[in-house]
Image: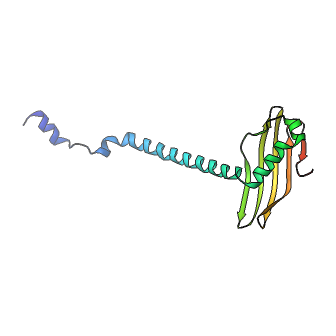
Amino acid sequence: MNQLEAHSRQQPRKNWWQRNWKWFVPTGCLTLIALFVVFIIAIFFTVTSMMKESTPYIESYQTAATNSYVIDRLGEPIEQKGTLQGNISITNNDGEANLTIPIRGPKGKGTIHVIGYKYNGKWSYDKMAIFIDASNETIDLLEE
């Protein structure tokens, strides 16, 4: 019996797991963490895009972007910048919305606050106002 055969009889060959666990475990954990983060980000962007397609968002943003006093304060064009916050709840033809929409124009920044209710498929608003950061003033968008 030569030396190679004697060595192979003394130590059986390790299986795949025994040879590779040191790199597989951290890689597997990092992969699971990355998948979890991607899942959370996907949920965030899905919810945000659904809120941007809602009637309260569209109506309040269009009202602010076409209001001459807001345009005078913020400049034109007015764009939504930042993270949309709030909630929208709709059941059948009824619902409610409470949104905070950060906006910006060439002259400054502001925040639209919207509180609205949907009854029998029609939205009405208790509050639709914009707070202008630079002047600390609030503009009621529901007043004509």
Q: Is residue 56 left or right of residue 38?
A: right
Q: Residue 139 falls in which quadrant of the image?
A: top right
Percent coordinates x, y for residue 137 in the rendering:
91, 41
Left/right placement of residue 20 relative to residue 82 reads: left
Point out the residue furthest to the top here.
Answer: 106
Extreme-left residue of the structure: 1
Q: Residue at x 74, y 52 (%)?
A: 86
Residue 55 vs 104, above or below: the answer is below
- Residue 100, percent across and down? 78, 48
**Colour scheme employed for the rendering of this structure:** rainbow
- Who is closer to the viewer here, 26 or 43? 43
Residue at point 79% right, 51% down? 59
Residue found at x 75% / y 55%: 55
Give whichever of 123, 135 is nearer the camera. 123
Query: Would you place residue 73 above or below residue 88 in this image?
Result: above
Where, by quadrant of the figure, is residue 28 drawn? top left
- Judged from this view, the residue extending furthest toward the right is 144
Q: Position of residue 116 (x, y in %)?
A: 81, 58
Dividing the picture into quadrants, the one containing residue 124 is: bottom right
Which quarter of the image is occupied by the N terminus? top left
